[in-house]
Image (tube, rainbow, N blue to C red):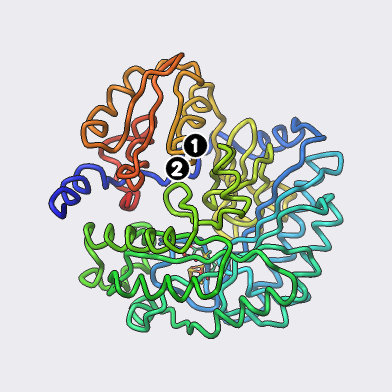
């Protein structure tokens, strides 16, 4: 068994994208700029509700594994200054959108949005409410690092309408925590969860990681048990993406202490089976949800979506991104804000939407993007339903079929690809077959499993 897993990993645990978009972000370029974005915003159906993403790129200390776009700040001033610019960006986008729009999803990501003070949170919500109609049943989510969360912030979040919190837990073992510069007690995480629930923020997600230095199956299982004691609605289980050539601070991690591919796989499978054993539905590659949770319900109905935060129920026609590095998703294509804070601030100071890169979608991109999204979400895709000619891709999956990772049936209009239970960890490799931009020499991605 061990040998067979080793063979599968050496064949399919390739450095392929996470497919949170297609084309993926490395294929965005300068050919899409602020003028295109303004036009795309103005073209949106005024009746269709939107989704908003606000990036808060600050943390109070740096986790050495971090792959997010963030900066450590010791003072409040840079945060306050940033929020002033963010408010201007919200005004600029609302102006470009024209008529006041309804909003059905808001996500505060980071970095650590929990670093904001109650007054700052109120000011952000005041600006959002001045520019948009956030619907009464909107999903409003925020990412929280329990270590920087001042519990006094929670009532302000609740007043703003926040109803979902994603809490970073990662790993409970002190040895692993020390190796990644993230000391976090179970008690502080528990206190955050209890205070959020008491304030009416009832939907709790927990982020966990595997593949960290010194992590082993026992540490992962202990962490899962701790996370389960918090009775979350959803959990995300992220494989540590070690990309020190892109994230220089990851060089602080002792590579000799990193688990190898087989050990990572064992951690992933042990964590997943414990979560499934506890009654959670396994969603896509790395999410778990209670059967009655809207994410599990959407998965069951084939209505799950995938975006830059992972699996979601958000099916808004467009997602407007705010803040440096934020990515917007429009019917016409993707746009990404400039990453450098100075360029972001200067752009907005000039009254420009601070777009650095993007990608207009061709008909082929839409087709392949839809196939990849269904495979990532449903672990199944009926190629006939999409109308394209995928004969070559179906043939390219033959090796995965022979290895028992996918099944290929003849459907009424074309091949139907089904990822088997054994193939779930390798679904990204199946998606890569449909990716016409991926070159065999691409090495910028982390391991697939
Ligand atoms: C923006 S953080 C969540 C909120 C908060 N900053 C925190 O860490 O508690 C998003 C999540 O991404 C995951 N993550 C960060 N860096 C990662 C990496 N290099 N590989 C895989 N997952 C990573 C962690 O699980 C983290 O909780
Ligand atoms: S707290 Fe979250 S965003 Fe900040 S460094 Fe750690 S993982 Fe990255």
| Residue linked to disc 1 | 373
- Residue 153 spot, x, y in % from top left: 72, 78
Q: How many marks?
A: 2
Query: 175 or 304: nearer the eye?
Result: 304
Cα distance in 3D space between marks 2 and 1: 8 Å
- Residue 61 spot, x, y in % from top left: 50, 78
User: In the visual, does 442 lie left or right of 130?
Assistant: left
| Residue linked to disc 2 | 19
On screen, residue 314 above or below 179:
above
Q: Quadrant of residue 332?
A: top right
CB contact under 8 Å: marks 2 and 1: yes
- Residue 213 spot, x, y in % from top left: 29, 72
Q: Residue at x 44, y 36 (%)?
A: 375
Q: Residue 438: which disc?
A: none
Which of labels 2 and 1 is toward the front? 1
Q: Residue at x 75, y 33 (%)?
A: 44
* Mark toward the start of the polypeptide (2 vs 1): 2
User: In the visual, does 388 lie left or right of 332?
Assistant: left
Q: Residue at x 35, y 70 (%)?
A: 220
């Amino acid at each position: 068994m061990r040998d067979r897993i080793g063979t599968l990993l050496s064949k399919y645990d390739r450095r392929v994208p996470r497919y949170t978009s297609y084309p993926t972000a490395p294929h965005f370029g300068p050919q899409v700029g602020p003028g295109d974005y303004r036009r795309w915003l103005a073209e949106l159906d005024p009746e269709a509700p939107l989704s908003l993403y606000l990036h808060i790129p600050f943390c109070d200390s740096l986790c050495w594994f971090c792959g997010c776009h963030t900066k450590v700040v010791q003072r409040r001033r840079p945060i306050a200054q940033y929020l002033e610019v963010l408010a201007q960006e919200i005004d600029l986008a609302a102006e470009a959108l024209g008529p006041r729009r309804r909003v059905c999803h808001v996500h505060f990501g980071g970095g650590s949005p929990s670093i904001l003070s109650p007054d700052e949170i109120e000011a952000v919500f005041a600006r959002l409410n001045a520019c948009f109609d956030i619907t009464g049943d909107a999903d409003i989510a925020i990412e929280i690092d329990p270590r920087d969360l001042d519990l006094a912030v929670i009532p302000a979040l609740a007043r703003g309408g926040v109803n979902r919190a994603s809490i970073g837990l990662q790993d409970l073992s002190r040895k692993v925590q020390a190796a990644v510069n993230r000391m976090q007690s179970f008690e502080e995480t528990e206190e955050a969860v209890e205070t959020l629930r008491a304030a009416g923020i009832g939907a709790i997600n927990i982020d966990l990681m595997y593949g960290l230095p010194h992590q082993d199956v026992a540490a992962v299982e202990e962490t899962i048990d701790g996370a389960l004691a918090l009775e979350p609605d959803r959990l995300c289980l992220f494989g540590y993406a070690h990309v020190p050539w892109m994230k220089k601070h990851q060089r602080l991690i002792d590579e000799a202490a990193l688990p190898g591919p087989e050990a990572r796989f064992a951690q992933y499978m042990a964590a997943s089976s414990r979560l499934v054993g506890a009654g959670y539905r396994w969603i896509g590659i790395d999410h778990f949800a209670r059967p009655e949770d809207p994410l599990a319900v959407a998965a069951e109905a084939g209505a799950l979506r995938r975006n830059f935060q992972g699996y979601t129920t958000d099916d808004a026609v467009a997602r407007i991104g705010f803040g440096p590095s934020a990515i917007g998703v429009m019917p016409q294509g993707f746009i990404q804000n400039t990453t450098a804070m100075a360029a972001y601030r200067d752009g907005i100071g000039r009254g420009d939407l601070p777009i650095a890169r993007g990608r207009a979608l061709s008909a082929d991109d839409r087709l392949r993007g839809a196939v990849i999204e269904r495979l990532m979400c449903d672990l199944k895709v009926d190629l006939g339903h999409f109308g394209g000619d995928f004969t070559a891709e179906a043939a390219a999956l033959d090796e995965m079929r022979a290895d028992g990772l996918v099944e290929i049936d003849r459907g009424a209009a074309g091949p139907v690809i089904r990822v088997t239970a054994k193939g779930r960890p390798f679904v990204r490799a199946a998606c890569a077959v449909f990716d016409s931009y991926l070159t065999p020499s691409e090495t910028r991605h982390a391991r697939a499993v």
